Image (tube, helix red, strand yellow):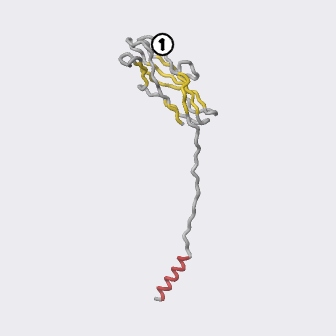
C-alpha cells in the first residue's frame, strides 16, 4: 500500500504543476463602401431612314459620339475597373404597328468603344453601335423602335 500511495502522491505533484495554457488573437472585419455605379442614356441608336428591301446597316460604336451611335454616361467610384455587357444577338427586335409579318426588324452585333475603367473623377462615356437586319421587299412603312439594355458592373 505504501508504494501505491507514494506513486499517487508523486503523480499528483507532477501533474498539479502543469496548468492549461490559453491565448487569444484579435482580428478586425474591414470593408469600404464604394460609390454605386450608374448608367444614364445620353442619346439613342439611330439607323437611316430607308425603303423596303434595303440592305442591312451597321452603325459603328466609334470613339466619339457621332449622332447615330447610342451614348451613355457612366458614373461611379473613381478609377474603378468596370465590365460592360451588351445585348446578345436575337434579343432586340424593333417593331411597328402590332409587330406582325413585315413589321419587325432585328438588331444584332452590338459593339462598344470598349470602356473598361472609370476615369479619376469616376466618369466614362460608353458609345454603342449595332447592325440592323436587311429589310424585306414588303417591309411595312412606319416608325420602328425597341428598347435595349446595357449592363455595367464593378
Q: In which quarter of the image is the C terminus?
A: top right
Q: Where is residue 8 in the image (x, y as percent from the top left)?
A: 49, 82
Q: How many labels does the image show?
A: 1
The answer to whether residue 1 is above or below residue 47 is below
* Direction right: furthest residue: 120
Single out the residue that lies furthest toward the left.
101
Q: Is residue 131 above or below residue 76?
A: above
What's the residue at 49%, 83% (across, down)?
7
Q: In the image, residue 147 lies at what x, y percent?
A: 46, 24
Residue under the point 48% across and 18% down = 58
x%, y% of residue 110? 48, 25
Q: Is residue 22 above or below residue 122?
A: below
Q: Quadrant of residue 79?
A: top right
Q: In which quarter of the image is residue 77?
A: top right
Judging depth in this view, the residue of 78 and 17 nearest the camera is 78
Residue behind mark 1: 49
Q: Residue at x 47, y 85 (%)?
A: 4
Instruction: Point out residue 133 in the picture as x, y percentages from the top left corner.
Output: 43, 18
- Circle 1 Cα neighbour tier, 10 Å, few/some/many (<14 / 14–19 / ≥20): few
Secondary structure type for disc 1: loop
Can you tell which quarter of the image residue 21 is in? bottom right
Left or right, residue 149 beside residue 137: right
Outermost residue to the bottom? 2
Q: Residue at x 55, y 28 (%)?
A: 40
Amino acid at each position: 500500500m505504501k508504494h501505491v500511495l507514494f506513486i499517487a502522491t508523486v503523480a499528483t505533484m507532477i501533474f498539479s504543476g502543469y496548468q492549461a495554457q490559453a491565448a487569444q488573437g484579435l482580428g478586425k472585419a474591414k470593408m469600404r463602401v464604394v460609390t454605386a455605379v450608374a448608367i444614364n442614356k445620353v442619346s439613342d441608336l439611330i439607323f437611316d431612314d430607308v425603303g423596303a428591301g434595303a440592305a442591312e446597316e451597321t452603325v459603328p460604336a466609334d470613339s466619339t459620339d457621332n449622332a447615330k451611335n447610342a451614348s451613355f454616361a457612366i458614373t461611379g467610384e473613381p478609377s474603378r475597373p468596370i465590365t460592360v455587357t451588351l445585348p446578345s444577338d436575337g434579343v432586340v427586335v424593333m417593331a411597328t404597328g402590332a409587330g406582325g409579318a413585315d413589321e419587325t426588324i432585328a438588331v444584332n452585333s452590338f459593339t462598344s468603344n470598349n470602356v473598361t475603367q472609370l476615369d479619376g473623377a469616376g466618369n466614362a462615356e460608353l458609345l454603342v453601335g449595332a447592325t440592323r437586319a436587311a429589310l424585306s421587299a414588303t417591309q411595312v412603312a412606319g416608325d420602328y423602335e425597341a428598347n435595349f439594355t446595357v449592363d455595367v458592373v464593378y
